[in-house]
């Protein structure tokens, strides 16, 4: 009989309607720490979270049994410097609340505070935004000696007099005052004085007046919005080019007469940057009653009832002060290298508001970056966001320095979609001057490399093979693809700003591309990975080439994603028009640099498109077999087996149709040496890194001099860096092997961990899939918690407690309950693995306890050898317990008819 605590956490499922064709699971990558808490991870330029966030229920969800507060691990969070690009700790929106208008505002802001932690750089010279971000050509202003522009004095007075206030009336937000209207009129008045530009369609600057900008994740209400959409009440994040937020709390008294005339000399000086050094205006204290999170309507309509946040630990607390010092050190010198550029450790309420809008823009469509402005009283700050973080300009008074305001308006008036972050390799269809939708836009790859397999006869030289694998072969001619959003095809963009920003775009080949790849449906996978990591296309090329060379493996090549061609360029490539490369005073550090990559692939069907349990069974047999032959021929592990990465396509077999399973998304793959029995160098480095971390956590941060010396040593010690590199785990929480979800030293990711992930995907899918409504997958709350230790605990209960096992499938469709016997056999197997893994961890602790001995003695060495022998025996049992043949046999069992 289950005890009370077991039944207390019984997971059940509930409906979660999602838009068709949308990604369903948030992906996690975690690193070793004494806990796997949901605290923020290292600076966002380290390996990011997987690029998908869970779209949560459109309606208020019922309370599930496992929604009750779970058991929590209370050990401290990891040090920021021990995490890397492959193991993010950055929070996701997976546990947020969603109303009928999208994610609830407090949850979004809590997410963003962690998401942007350590990536906000302030104080960039204003002229860099004009010239390097928006690509403003001052020649378009046709400035002459007598040129001048004027700000209408009546509009200026109206803006200064009126405050931007909001009140609640019958639970609806109502706007009072005319400050926003006055600023909109000032903008339009100055814009009307700009000379026209031939064949250019300017974006429309909208005063939103409480109209929402629609999106896939939320209904947002920025104060200003720029787009080619004519009506302010029909704005959508997809077609939005830029946004603006205004905070005007009190009437501004005009102590000094503001300039209302803008001379050409001032404009040229402001554009060139040859002006007096500007200091960021200090924030003035807000009047009582003003919400520090800004005046977003969502904050008023849905009052914030969150518990008060815990105060920051003092610098004397174990680890926390140390981590903060390293936070401050990690980016300033390496990326910016100038004193006048300041990295902010957090966002204020108003900054968080504009960051929220930029985050939404980057979570929609195909963007390289997003921009906007924040107007607080009369002080304006310009904002820029890309996959590396946030950048803001120095602040300026729009009336004391009206030349800056005019240049901002000119940049927004003359800017093309690409100047506001729309990907530069996408162009509008012929005879189209307005950017309204991505449909029919043309994606051009200027120098793609073919992924056609080389000959198997050995005629290729080793150098030619290496060039093929590294995509360094001859470039194809420019290739064109048309974005095709017909037949319910969608652009899928990862939620969030920091990271790879993966976007999957449905396309059709044109011209030469069609001659090479045919007329069928394709998808372009666009991403911004860290430049120094092995690219996904390299893994795909290597594993497909090696499988093709082996007669036994070649028949299963169809189960590995096919790559048509790939394209890559560095962030400072002129064709990319990427502002980050020009914004910095010094080059970005090599290990922080991102690049832009495109993979062109066939379009596959998601797992929920299966028509029967038999089809689902065949898909799993196919992908497990393909995965096995990848490992046999290339020693490459996928390391992120998940629902979204198992896909399929259909082929005709005589009069019948059959499915062919395909394993996709190899961007977290890694070459694996050995079978996991021997103690590897990486494992030793992992343990040494843990020991280093513990030593640093015990060191007192009271002596600033010692802190500085330690920081320098942490940066300069290459051996320490290598030890840190060994600490990473990857995967998607609900589908990760239970062993990888345990606190303690990071286990080495092994072949058996990938095999266990296939089991978790099948169990999850059978529990949440409803064939009558296939795109509205339910969720298992206990497997979706932010704290991955809690996820591991819930999944352990699924393995060991039959009541939990049965209740997980309480709402499963009867047809897919036919897998219950398969799952019972598999859960029995992985329950044994769990027991053996616990013994393996104990033996490893014994071995490394003696391994760390500072003064080895002969007796210690004998004991250490005995411990090592026991450890290797345990690992051999684990290796032999989970094999391809055994797991495939369990998946291949015939499905019994429904009784």
Image: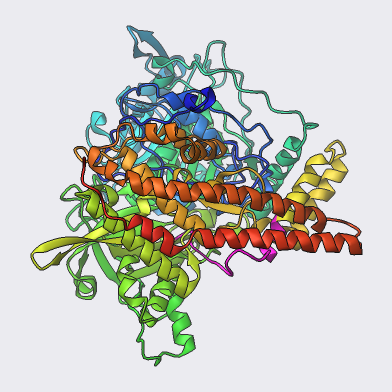
Q: Is residue 754 magenta?
A: no
Could you tell me how many numbered marks the image carries? 0
Residue 49, visible in the rendered structure: no
Rendered location of residue 574, percent (x, y)? 45, 64
**Residue lying farthest to the left in this orientation:** 655
Q: 687 or 593, which lies in front?
A: 687
- Residue 873 percent across, percent down from the top left: 65, 62
Residue at figure coordinates x 34%, y 79% from the top left: 453
Q: Residue furthest top?
A: 170
- Between residues 875 and 574, which one lies in front from this camera angle? 875
Q: Magenta residues, as a range?
A: 667-686
Q: Is residue 471 left or right of residue 240?
A: right
In the image, taking residue 828 as reference, residue 287 lies left or right, namely right
- Give the vertical position of 202 relative to 655 (above or below): above
Residue 434 in percent (x, y) is at 23, 47
In the image, 41 versus 735, the foreground residue is 735
Instruction: Classify residue 114 by image quadrant.
Output: top right
Magenta stretch encompasses residue 684: yes
Q: Relative to residue 457, is residue 378 drawn left or right?
A: right
- Residue under the point 31% across and 32% down: 16
Q: Is residue 582 above or below residue 535?
A: above
């Amino acid at each position: 009989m289950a005890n009370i605590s077991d039944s207390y956490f019984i997971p059940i499922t509930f409906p979660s309607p999602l838009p068709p064709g949308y990604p369903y699971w948030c992906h996690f990558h975690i690193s070793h720490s004494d806990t796997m808490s949901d605290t923020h991870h290292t600076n966002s330029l380290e390996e990011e979270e997987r690029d998908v966030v869970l779209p949560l229920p459109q309606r208020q969800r019922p309370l599930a049994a496992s929604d009750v507060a779970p058991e929590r691990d209370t050990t401290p969070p990891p040090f920021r410097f021990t995490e890397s690009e492959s193991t993010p700790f950055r929070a996701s929106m997976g546990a947020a609340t969603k109303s009928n208008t999208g994610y609830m505002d407090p949850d979004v802001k809590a997410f963003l505070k962690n998401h942007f932690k350590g990536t906000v750089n302030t104080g960039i010279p204003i002229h860099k935004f004009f010239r390097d971000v928006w690509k403003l050509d001052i020649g378009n202003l046709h400035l002459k000696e007598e040129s001048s522009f004027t700000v209408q004095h009546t509009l200026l007075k109206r803006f200064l007099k009126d405050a931007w206030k909001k009140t609640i009336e019958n639970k609806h937000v109502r706007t009072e005052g005319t400050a926003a209207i006055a600023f909109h009129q000032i903008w339009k008045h100055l814009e009307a004085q700009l000379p026209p530009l031939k064949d250019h369609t300017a974006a429309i600057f909208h005063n939103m007046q409480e109209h929402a900008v629609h999106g896939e994740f939320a209904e947002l209400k920025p104060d200003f919005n720029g787009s080619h959409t004519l009506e302010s009440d029909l704005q959508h994040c997809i077609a939005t080019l830029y946004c603006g937020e205004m905070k005007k709390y009190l009437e501004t008294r005009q102590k000094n007469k503001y300039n209302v005339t803008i001379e050409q000399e001032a404009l040229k000086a402001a554009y060139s940057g040859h002006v007096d050094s500007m200091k960021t205006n200090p924030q003035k204290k807000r009047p009582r009653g003003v919400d520090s999170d800004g005046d977003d309507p969502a904050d008023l309509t849905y009052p914030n009832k969150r518990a008060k946040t815990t105060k920051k630990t003092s610098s004397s607390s174990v680890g926390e002060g140390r981590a903060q010092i390293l936070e401050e050190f990690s980016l300033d010198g390496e990326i910016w290298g100038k004193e006048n550029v300041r990295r902010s450790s957090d966002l204020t309420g108003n900054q968080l508001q504009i960051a929220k809008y930029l985050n939404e823009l980057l979570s929609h469509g195909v963007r390289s970056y997003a921009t906007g402005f924040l107007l607080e009283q009369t002080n304006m700050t310009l904002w820029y966001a890309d996959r590396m973080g946030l950048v803001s300009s120095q602040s300026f008074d729009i009336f004391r320095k009206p030349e800056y305001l005019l240049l901002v308006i000119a940049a927004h008036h003359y800017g093309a979609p690409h100047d506001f972050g729309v990907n530069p390799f996408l162009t509008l269809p012929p005879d189209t001057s307005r950017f309204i939708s991505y449909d029919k836009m043309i994606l051009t790859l200027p120098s793609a490399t073919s992924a056609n397999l080389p000959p198997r006869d050995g005629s290729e030289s080793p150098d030619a093979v290496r060039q093929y694998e590294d995509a360094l072969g001859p470039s194809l001619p420019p290739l064109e693809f048309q974005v095709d959003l017909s037949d319910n095809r969608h652009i899928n963009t990862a939620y969030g700003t920091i990271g790879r920003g993966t976007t999957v775009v449905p396309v059709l080949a044109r011209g030469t591309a069609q001659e090479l790849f045919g007329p069928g449906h394709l998808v372009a996978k666009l991403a911004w990975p860290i430049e120094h990591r092995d690219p996904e296309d390299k893994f795909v090329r290597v594993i497909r080439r090696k499988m093709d060379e082996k007669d036994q493996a070649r028949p299963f090549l169809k189960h590995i994603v096919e790559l048509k061609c790939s394209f890559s360029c560095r962030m400072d490539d002129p064709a990319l028009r990427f502002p980050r490369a020009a914004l910095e005073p010094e080059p970005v550090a090599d290990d922080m640099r991102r690049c832009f990559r495109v993979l062109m692939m066939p379009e596959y069907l998601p797992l929920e498109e299966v028509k029967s349990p038999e089809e689902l069974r065949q898909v799993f047999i196919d992908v497990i077999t393909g995965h096995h032959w990848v490992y046999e021929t290339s020693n490459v592990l996928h390391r992120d087996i998940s629902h979204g990465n198992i896909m399929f396509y259909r082929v005709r077999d005589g009069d019948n149709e059959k499915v062919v399973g395909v394993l996709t998304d190899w961007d977290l793959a890694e070459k694996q040496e050995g079978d996991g029995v021997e103690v590897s160098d990486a494992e030793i480095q992992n343990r040494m890194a843990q020991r280093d971390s513990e030593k640093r956590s015990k060191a007192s941060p009271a002596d600033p001099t010692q802190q500085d010396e330690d920081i320098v040593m942490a940066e300069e010690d290459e051996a320490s860096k290598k030890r840190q590199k060994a600490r990473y785990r990857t995967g998607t929480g609900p589908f990760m092997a239970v062993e990888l979800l345990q606190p303690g030293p990071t286990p080495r990711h092994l072949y058996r961990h990938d095999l266990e992930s296939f089991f978790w995907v099948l169990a999850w899918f059978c529990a949440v899939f409803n064939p009558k409504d296939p795109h509205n997958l339910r969720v298992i709350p206990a497997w979706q918690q932010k704290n991955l230790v809690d996820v591991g605990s819930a999944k352990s209960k699924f393995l060991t407690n039959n009541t939990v096992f049965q209740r997980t499938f309480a709402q499963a469709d009867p047809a897919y309950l036919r897998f219950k016997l398969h799952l019972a056999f598999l859960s029995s197997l992985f329950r044994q693995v769990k027991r053996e893994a616990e013994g393996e961890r104990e033996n490893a602790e014994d071995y490394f306890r003696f391994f760390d001995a500072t003064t080895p003695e002969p007796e210690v060495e004998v004991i250490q050898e005995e411990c090592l022998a026991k450890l290797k025996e345990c690992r051999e049992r684990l290796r032999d317990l989970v094999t391809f043949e055994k797991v495939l046999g369990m998946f291949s069992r015939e499905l019994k008819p429904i009784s």
